[in-house]
Amino acid sequence: MNKICSILLLLPFISAFAPSGVAHNRNPSSALFSVADLKAAFELSPKTFLLDVREPNEWAEGHLALASPNPLSVLTSGTWMDRATGKFSPGSFPIDRATGVAIMPNKKVYIHCKMGGRAKQAGELLTQMGYQDVVVLEETFDELVAAEICDVVIGEVQDLTD
């Protein structure tokens, strides 16, 4: 009985070291990832999803042409339901700019922001929502621009499919 109680008391501490399901490209425990991998993903498939979780004013100042605008404030503002448990939680599904439809949870999703903090929060949210292959880009927006992943566009989003 004492062994069972000891194990139950240790479970929260053990689970704290379990992988979160979000890959970070500079984290040595994650799969190796580089900006070159992101470039290659776009070349292989135009359906590569790159979420820009910066706010609309930041997007208007300049954004990657291949990115979909999904501000963190919008991603965290809605409510979603876990189909397995029926539990409601805060969050909104990210939208694919090309189709105007929610990105399916089985698709690989790259996420970026200006400095990396909001991208990490969005990655954790998407993983909680059931997205299975989330890559949080730790490069700053300026570093991604310098890497020439794609063209940089200035201006607001006219509609989701602009």
Image: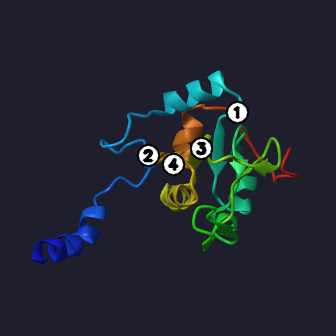
Q: Which residue is the site of mark 1?
A: 47
Task: Tell me the mark number nearer the camera, choosing from 2 and 4.
Answer: 2
The answer to whether one can see residue 62 in this image is: no
Callout 4: helix, strand or loop?
loop
Three-letter code for the amino acid on which mark 2 is drawn: Ala
Mark 1: give few (<14), some (14-19) or many (20+) Cα within 10 Å: some
Q: Which residue is the site of mark 2?
A: 23
Instruction: From this view, report whether residue 31 is shown above or below residue 159.
Output: above
Disc 1 from disc 3: Cα separation: 10 Å
The answer to whether one can see residue 67 in this image is: yes
Residue 89 location (% of width, % of height): 60, 72
Q: How is the image coloured?
A: rainbow
Three-letter code for the amino acid on which mark 3 is drawn: Val
Seen at 82% across and 49% down, the residue is 100
Pointer 3 or 2: first along the chain: 2
Residue 37 location (% of width, % of height): 51, 29
Does 129 sit left or right of 157 as displayed? left
Q: Which residue is the site of mark 3?
A: 109
Q: Nearer the viewer, residue 10 or 135?
A: 10
Three-letter code for the amino acid on which mark 4 is drawn: Thr
Seen at 68% across and 46% down, the residue is 104
Instruction: From this view, report whether residue 120 is shown above or below residue 144.
Output: below
Q: Nearer the viewer, residue 104 or 110?
A: 104
Mark 4: give few (<14), some (14-19) or many (20+) Cα within 10 Å: some
Q: Residue furthest front?
A: 1
Seen at 62% across and 40% down, the residue is 107
Disc 2 from disc 4: Cα separation: 16 Å
Callout 2: helix, strand or loop?
strand
Q: Which residue is the site of mark 4?
A: 140
Quadrant holding the N terminus: bottom left
Pointer 1 or 3: first along the chain: 1
Callout 1: helix, strand or loop?
loop
